[in-house]
Image (spheres, rainbow, N blue to C red):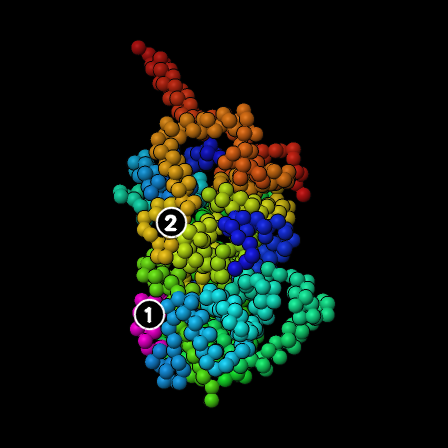
């Protein structure tokens, strides 16, 4: 996933560095209520990334966390952080994707990319709301051979939720299972998302139940990576 | 309260164990949510209306004492009597006093979450007064000795067969199959109760300061029948039900029904300006911890809630765990804020019954930032910066605090983070079974962990950097070698 993200950025002309001092944005701590413990990690982020023109993150929820930090917790200016697809579309102006991915794909709309970052229009927004483009959807549409299919529930939460997936393990698993079943009914071969943590949870549920779906980060799809299990689960 | 006890996750597990029921529950509420979404999308001014609702509520809450005084004065002009109760006990004493002094033995009551909050039914029953809930859903749960599981749809956790069994067991009904027959039977039963009642108790949806009137919204007309027959009407309300002007009412009536069930408006929106001729109207205004929440700048806006239930219907947790999985009379996202703000220790698991998906915040008709509020309460539990009014620090917080401190220490150093990653990868590759025991078992009971790579991305990337630097160096040397000396 990380390599695919890097290659994607380089393929579209970005000069990319991966600073070695980086660790974690602190979101897991912040979401369990430990704001004080998360703060030094935000400061560490600022120190590590302040010299760059743009910071790009292949995760909607980490990006949302860093936006929060920039808005509330930062003592020094923090560089603007972009979610990967958002950066490709809005900053690099990517329209064409070279890759080919001849499979049926369903996009899991991760809550933080959708509702916190505004990368897309949540299904519950009412009349008069400004529709927002979903950069991930836009990029997937440009991939050769890819068929994008839609689940019944457009943007239901997968149930990962950070510490939630452990404190509320049974609920979290049921939410994941319901999502997997919905995706399966679309006849999709691959579930993709802007967020690795949702995919880890969803694939964890799916693989335990030996279901046919494969889970790939959107960067891997956009690079046309091979399926993790090419033999398994024939295309309908 | 439900007969079950324990933290939310434990109660949720119990509800989930009945897979059919929990899937039915999720599907039924998803349908309500879908109707609401459709309505909201169909109204071009919907988001503007929500913003307006939020502004009116914020304004009202900022001047609540003034509006309470204004409301009381105007209600009195119409001949109503206004009572103020500091807490649930005082509310119950006032209501009992009113009933006793007038020799009332039988009461009909339309839906009121406030009386649930105060435990009015058991209190009155203990004092020999018969109370009948006249909302169909409320009647069903009352017959089952259960609390409502949803503030708008009190019996949504039950299926048709459960209702039929309840009517047979408690009211001697013949076995009834379809909803229409069940409703018909309940109507017969309730008609006797309405005719025999000596007083009607209602909740209040909106109290208008400018006019001194109150508005009660129902779909069944049960509040109207309950106040039209007996001469004594007692209306019970939390002090946050106030709105400033009659002109503001339209905003909230439009927001309420659309948010609650996807209806354009409730079937009955009944206005009471004083008692009916020859009757009495008593309005009991209850604080019960609301002023303390109002005094919290970060949480004041939680009092804007108009009890539409939209946050519950959209909540992926509520839909699957059911209202009885919450340790409080108002369940779901809003209940998980209001209850811990009063008693953090008792309701400490509720703020964690949330995946932070943010859908509740997106639907709230009065702009409460519900998921942010839940996060703030988690923060209090763990960081414990300030004591919570009437509550003590959640006992589960110590564990979280330690875990967070250790994680913060590891993640504050790139070297420590790398070492932890290496250890996790090593164990993950050699002994994947180890992750099925101990603290990780709550993950791995239902989920596979992803396969572990040999090296981290950072290591691989560093290796590429070295490789590329070497390549560049060789190319430079080659170029130099080609230059003729």
Check the picture and name the quadrant holding the C terminus of chain A. top right
The residue beneath circle 2 is: B393
Residue A31 in sight here: no
Q: Position of residue B274 (x, y in %)?
A: 42, 83
Residue A27 picture quarter:
top left
Q: Chain ID for label 1?
A: B
**Residue B65 magenta:** yes
Which residue in the rendered view is the most extreme toward the front? B127
Residue B470 lies, in percent from the top left, at 39, 19
Left or right: residue A126 compared with residue B24: left
Q: Farthest bottom residue?
A: B278
Horizontally, is B98 left or right of B447 in the view?
left
Query: What residue sits 49% from the left and 44% below the top?
Result: A167
Q: Residue at x 35, y 54 (%)?
A: B388
Residue depicted at x 40% and y 44%: B397
Name the residue that disc number 1 marks: B64
């Amino acid at each position: 996933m990380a390599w695919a993200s890097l290659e994607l950025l380089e393929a579209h002309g970005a000069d990319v560095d991966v600073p070695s001092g980086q660790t974690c944005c602190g979101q897991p701590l912040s979401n369990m209520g430990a704001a004080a413990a998360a703060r030094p990690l935000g400061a560490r982020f600022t120190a590590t990334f302040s010299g760059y023109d743009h910071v790009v993150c292949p995760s909607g929820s980490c990006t949302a966390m860093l936006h929060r930090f920039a808005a509330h917790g930062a003592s020094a200016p923090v560089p603007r952080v972009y979610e990967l697809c958002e950066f490709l579309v809005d900053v690099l102006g990517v329209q064409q994707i070279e890759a080919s991915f001849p499979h049926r794909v369903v996009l899991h709309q991760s809550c933080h990319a959708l509702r916190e970052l505004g990368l897309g229009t949540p299904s519950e927004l009412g009349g008069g709301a400004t529709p927002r483009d979903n950069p991930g959807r836009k990029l997937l549409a440009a991939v050769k051979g890819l068929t994008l299919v839609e689940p019944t529930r457009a943007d239901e939460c997968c149930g990962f939720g950070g510490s939630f997936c452990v404190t509320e393990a049974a609920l979290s698993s049921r939410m994941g299972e319901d999502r997997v079943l919905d995706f399966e009914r679309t006849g999709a071969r691959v579930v993709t998302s802007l967020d690795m943590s949702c995919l880890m949870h969803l694939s964890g549920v799916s693989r335990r139940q030996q279901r046919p779906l494969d889970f790939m980060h959107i960067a891997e799809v956009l690079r046309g990576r091979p399926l993790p299990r090419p033999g398994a689960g024939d295309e309908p | 309260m439900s007969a079950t006890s324990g933290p939310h996750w434990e109660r949720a597990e119990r509800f989930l164990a009945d897979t059919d029921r929990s899937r039915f529950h999720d599907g039924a509420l998803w349908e309500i949510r879908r109707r609401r979404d459709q309505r909201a999308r169909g109204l071009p001014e919907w988001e503007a209306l929500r913003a307006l609702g939020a502004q009116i509520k914020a304004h009202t809450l900022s001047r609540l004492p003034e509006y309470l005084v204004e409301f009381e004065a105007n209600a009195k002009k119409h001949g109503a009597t206004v009572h103020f109760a500091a807490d649930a006990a005082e509310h119950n004493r006032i209501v009992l006093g009113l009933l006793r002094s007038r020799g009332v033995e039988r009461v009909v009551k339309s839906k009121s979450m406030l009386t649930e909050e105060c435990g009015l039914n058991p209190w009155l029953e203990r004092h020999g007064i018969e109370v009948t809930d006249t909302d169909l859903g409320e009647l069903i749960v009352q017959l089952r000795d259960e609390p409502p599981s949803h503030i708008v749809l009190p019996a949504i956790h039950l299926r048709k067969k459960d209702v039929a069994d309840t009517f047979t067991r408690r009211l001697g009904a013949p076995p009834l199959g379809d909803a229409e027959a069940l409703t018909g039977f309940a109507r017969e039963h309730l008609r006797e109760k309405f005719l025999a009642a000596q007083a009607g108790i209602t909740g209040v949806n909106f109290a208008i300061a400018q006019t001194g009137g109150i508005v009660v919204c129902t779909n069944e007309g049960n509040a109207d029948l309950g106040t039209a027959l007996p001469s004594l009407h007692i209306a019970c309300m939390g002090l946050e039900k106030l709105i400033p002007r009659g002109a503001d009412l339209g905003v909230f009536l439009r927001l309420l029904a659309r948010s609650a069930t996807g209806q354009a408006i409730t079937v009955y929106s009944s206005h009471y300006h004083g008692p009916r001729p020859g009757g009495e109207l008593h309005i009991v205004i209850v604080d019960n911890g609301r002023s303390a929440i109002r005094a919290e700048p970060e949480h004041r806006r939680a009092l804007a809630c108009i009890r539409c239930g939209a946050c519950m219907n959209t909540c992926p947790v509520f839909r699957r765990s059911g209202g009885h999985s919450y340790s409080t009379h108002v369940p779901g996202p809003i209940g998980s804020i209001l209850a811990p703000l009063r008693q953090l220790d008792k309701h400490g698991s509720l703020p964690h019954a949330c995946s932070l998906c943010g859908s509740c915040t997106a639907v709230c008709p009065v702009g409460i930032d519900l998921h942010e509020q839940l996060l703030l309460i988690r923060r209090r539990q763990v960081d414990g910066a300030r004591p919570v009014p009437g509550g003590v620090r959640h006992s589960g917080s110590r564990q979280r605090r330690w875990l967070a401190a250790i994680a913060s220490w590891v993640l504050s150093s790139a070297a420590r983070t790398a070492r932890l990653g290496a250890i996790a990868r090593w164990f993950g590759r050699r002994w994947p079974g180890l992750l099925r025991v101990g603290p990780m078992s709550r993950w791995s009971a239902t989920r596979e962990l992803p396969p572990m790579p040999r090296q981290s991305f950072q290591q691989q990337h560093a290796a590429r950097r070295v490789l590329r630097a070497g390549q560049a160096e060789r190319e430079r040397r080659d170029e130099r070698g080609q230059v003729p000396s």
